[in-house]
Amino acid sequence: MAGRRGDTRERIQRVALELFVEQGYEKTSLREIAERLGVTKAALYYHFRTKEDIVHSLVADLSAALDELLEWAGERPRAREEVLRRFAALVDQRFGPVMEFVQQNMPAMRELGLKHTLGEKLAELFQLICADDEDPATQLRARLALVALILGANPMFSSGRVAPPPRDVALEVALELAVPRRSGGSAT
């Protein structure tokens, strides 16, 4: 029974996120989420009382995944390439739409008190990728590497105006930025 409840929760999150990205957070109601799910509002309330609760759960899930990555990376201070690969997998496999939602709904994120939650996690990730390198160019490349991974998996490209890059291109670009290779092929 617990598995089914988790599946329902994830389904609600997925559908709500689709609507939030399509219409914007402010323009989406719980009624619309319930309708798209094909359930009553009462059934939706069983899992989430408000749409704020849904957003908090999405951010909490992403935050927990980032915490796991940060913990893993903290034990491996020189694993810059693998950290980027793991972050790319998180973004690509589940959290790209959450990050798109966050980017599109910054006023709502501030209002819900969630803006700093993810920003702090990404700042920590940035620090790990920089690995105490104080060179401004290296730091900028690390920031751009994270941006490349976030934008590379971002569904905003599906609007038809811009063709999405192949999934592996964002990782390739991020690795070129943050783990530059010398002409001999060894990492710097």
Image (spheres, helix red, strand yellow):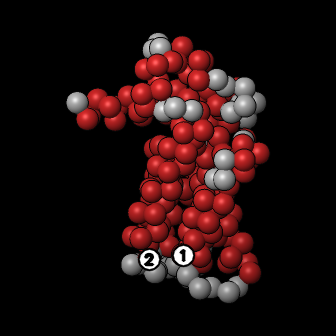
Residue type indicated by callout 2 = Gly
**Is residue 147 placed above or below 38 in the rendered structure?**
below
Q: Which of 45 and 123 is in front in this view?
A: 45
Position of residue 113 in the picture relative to residue 56 (left or right): right
Q: Nearer the viewer, residue 139 or 101?
A: 101
**Circles 1 and 2 in contact, beta carbons < 8 Å:** yes
Position of residue 76 in the picture relative to residue 88 (left or right): left
Residue at (59, 76) in percent of width and height: 127
Residue at (50, 73) in percent of width and height: 80
Position of residue 40 in the picture relative to residue 123 (left or right): left
Position of residue 142 in the picture relative to residue 95 (left or right): right
Residue type indicated by callout 1 = Leu
Kindly tell me whether residue 10 is visible in this rendering.
Answer: yes
Q: Is mark 1 on a helix, strand or loop?
A: helix
What is the quadrant of the C terminus in the image?
A: bottom right
**Classed neighbour count for the residue bearing mark 1: other residues with Cα under 10 Å, few (<14), some (14–19), many (≥20):** many
Which residue is the extreme one toward the left? 1
The residue where tag 2 is placed is 74
**Is residue 40 placed above or below 121 in the rendered structure?**
above
The residue where tag 1 is placed is 128
Q: Where is residue 175 in the image (x, y as percent from the top left)?
A: 56, 65
What is the quadrant of the N terminus in the image?
A: top left
Residue at (50, 56) in percent of width and height: 63
Q: Where is residue 38 in the image (x, y as percent from the top left)?
A: 47, 12
Q: Which of 30 and 162 is in front in this view?
A: 30
**Is residue 139 placed above or below 94 in the rendered structure?**
below
**Is residue 118 placed above or below 127 in the rendered structure?**
above
Q: Where is residue 43 in the image (x, y as percent from the top left)?
A: 43, 20
Name which of mark 1 and mark 2 comes first in the sequence: 2
Image mark count: 2
- Quarter of the image where one finds residue 27: top right
Q: Position of residue 42 (x, y in %)?
A: 46, 19
